[in-house]
Amino acid sequence: MCRGARLADRIELRVFGLDCADEVAMLRHELEPLVRSSDRLAFDILRGKLTVAPGAPAVDADAVRAAVARTGMRAELWQDVPAGDPRAAWQRLGRTALTSASGVLTLAAFGLHAARGGIVAALGSEGLGTDTATPAAVAGLYTAAVATGGWFILPRAWSAARRLRPDMNLLMTIAVIGAAAIGEWFEAAVVTFLFAVSLALESWSVNRARRAVEALLAFAPPTARAIQDDGAIVDVPAEDVAVGARLLVKPGDRIPLDGFVRQGTSHVNEAPITGESLPVEKAPGADVFAGTINTDGALEIEVTRIVGDTTLAQIIRMVGEAQSRRSPSEQWVDRFARVYTPAILGLAIVVAIVPPLVAGGWSDWLYRALVLLVIGCPCALVISTPVSIVASLAAAARHGVLVKGGAFIEVPARLRAVALDKTGTLTEGAPRVVTVTPLNGHDERELLGVLGAIEAHSDHPLARAIVSHVQTAGLPPMAAADVRAVDGRGVTAMVNGKRYWLGSHRFLEEQRQATPDVHDRLEAMSGAGHTVVVVGTDAHVCGLVTLADRVRAESPGAVAALRAAGVEHVVMLTGDNHPTAERIAEESGISEVRAELLPADKVAAVEDLVRRYGTVAMIGDGVNDAPAMGRATIGIAMGAAGSDAAIEAADVALMADDLSRLAWLIRHSRRTLAIIRQNVVLSIGVKAVFVALTFTGYTTLWAAIAADMGVSLVVIANALRLLASWPRS
């Protein structure tokens, strides 16, 4: 689906070469004078997307593209394209070709020079600039090697120089120019080639994480089987299907769009959305999501979202946008690099000038200064953290955990307390019949028949639970007449010619049939945390039905896993009554309960936890608990699949109703932090060693850049280990 440059003055561009924070900084510098506010700029690194929001002054897409071009990158109007975009592939191919050409030209120049003047001459400046033709040809080959290797580097170096903000591109360019100026052509070419290789590796590593997320698009088929009004089935592009259309999904097919089941039953593998590979049973009325796999039965579904608004599309979009919300580690690396890079440049200038003034040897100290520039380049350090965060976000999304930014991927590692809502979080969120107690000579089947007949006329959650229980019991339907609600306290109706009533304890007392035995039973049932519905006639009480919201099967294990993961305190916050709350807490393994809380009370409870424990998570449904989730260090929404509100309200969205993902998220966050720390220590440690070797004269330009590239390779490989956190379907 192609979009224009403007949508109410909104500009969306695909930027080729947008791979890391350095490129974002360059683009911001060029674009902020144009748009007058950085808040109008949004960058999606995973998809290489630049968005300029509407505002004053109005800007033209061509002006934005020209500003992008000044950074050495290229932009074009945004198009939603599937994974494996051929234009991006050509961009990568061009980078690979130029980098390879640089390496080939360097080897050719070295071989030609060695053949003419020997290995020693080829490794140094001897022989170049003599009166023979061959060294001039060698110099030409080395120059070509530097030009091809520096094709993507020089524009960025120039941009950094204009901004007066030295970065690794500028450091490397100065080192290469300096090496060529003193006749170290071999080292100038090798440095350029190896640095181009390191940038290509950076681009490759981000592209791998990018492809990992964009591959989710492949889960949604490009076509759908649309059912026409006359019953004919026609294959149409998924992007042309409108809301309300009917689709046929055969066994083994992927569901093309979000919707609900109109006809048919089947099991659907929802792993692309929730990360849960066990198939979920689907019957008429059940929601289904684009990209999930229909396994064993034909389904007719009605579409509820167009292709760009499906839950799958939202996940991909949110993960991409999450990269702009930078983690504390990324922010620290940025601050460090902003001080470190100019400091290295200044130190190199001092090394090039001060020692020669004192002791002479200008050429030797200039060479050491160039080596210092190369080894001082923060390439590995700058690459390592963003790649770690991108890989971590991608792995979490594939695991059914949507983390809305690098700023939130590190928080779970430090959690000390977790607050959980009750309904829909620890429990299933819907009442179910627990016991049916006939009284005064009535039997269970008769009682359920009457209940089913009367409650079939109500849409109350308790009524739906009772009707569902009656249907499960397989009882034949009965008819009720003259059904009347009694001011919210109960209902009366005629069934089989007899008047029945049903309702609460209060309604029972109004009927003046509350015998001591019935009263004691009601008190015991209510004290156990159950809701009680009383059924009676004009003569007596016919029976009692208890209902309760059941604890999720995984809740006790999830709470235990949280404690095993190091969470010191787990508390339940609910607006329900104390007996019910205490029953749910006991079944879930939670020791502290705060019940009968209004939304403001939940906020106060979370604030108290933050004061006591510092780092606190609040887990709820993402809507009703939004105030408390906003006050917590991190808000986590349960069961957000298909819910726009839940995804928007929380910092983290668990796409499936699975509390066990909380402990996984904590472990994943700690693993992410550990890998980031390993990479930072390794990057700085290797540089410290080579800086010391530089001052003693025991290293060379090519050895320094080889070491830097080697560290870059190691930290990238270490960061990409996070992708191994993906679940196996």
Image (cartoon, rainbow, N blue to C red):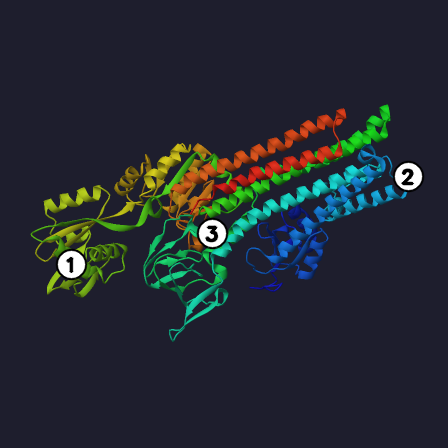
Q: Say which of 425 and 305 sits in front.
A: 305
At label 1, counting other C-alpha atoms closer than 10 Å, the crowd grade (few under 14, some 14-19, many 20 or more) is some
In the structure shown, which secondary structural element does the residue marked by tag 3 occupy?
helix
- Residue 240 % position (x, y): 49, 68
Q: Amino acid at mark 3?
A: Glu
Residue 449 is marked as 1
Q: Say which of 502 and 443 sits in front.
A: 443
Q: Say which of 440 and 177 sits in front.
A: 177
At label 3, counting other C-alpha atoms closer than 10 Å, the crowd grade (few under 14, some 14-19, many 20 or more) is some
Whether pointer 2 and pointer 3 mark residues with C-beta atoms closer than 8 Å, the reply is no
Q: Is residue 631 visible?
A: yes
Q: List the single residue furthest toward the front.
A: 115
Q: Quarter-wise, where is residue 459 in the image?
A: bottom left
Q: Amino acid at mark 1?
A: Gly
In the structure shown, which secondary structural element does the residue marked by tag 1 occupy?
helix
Relative to 170, residue 682 above or below: above
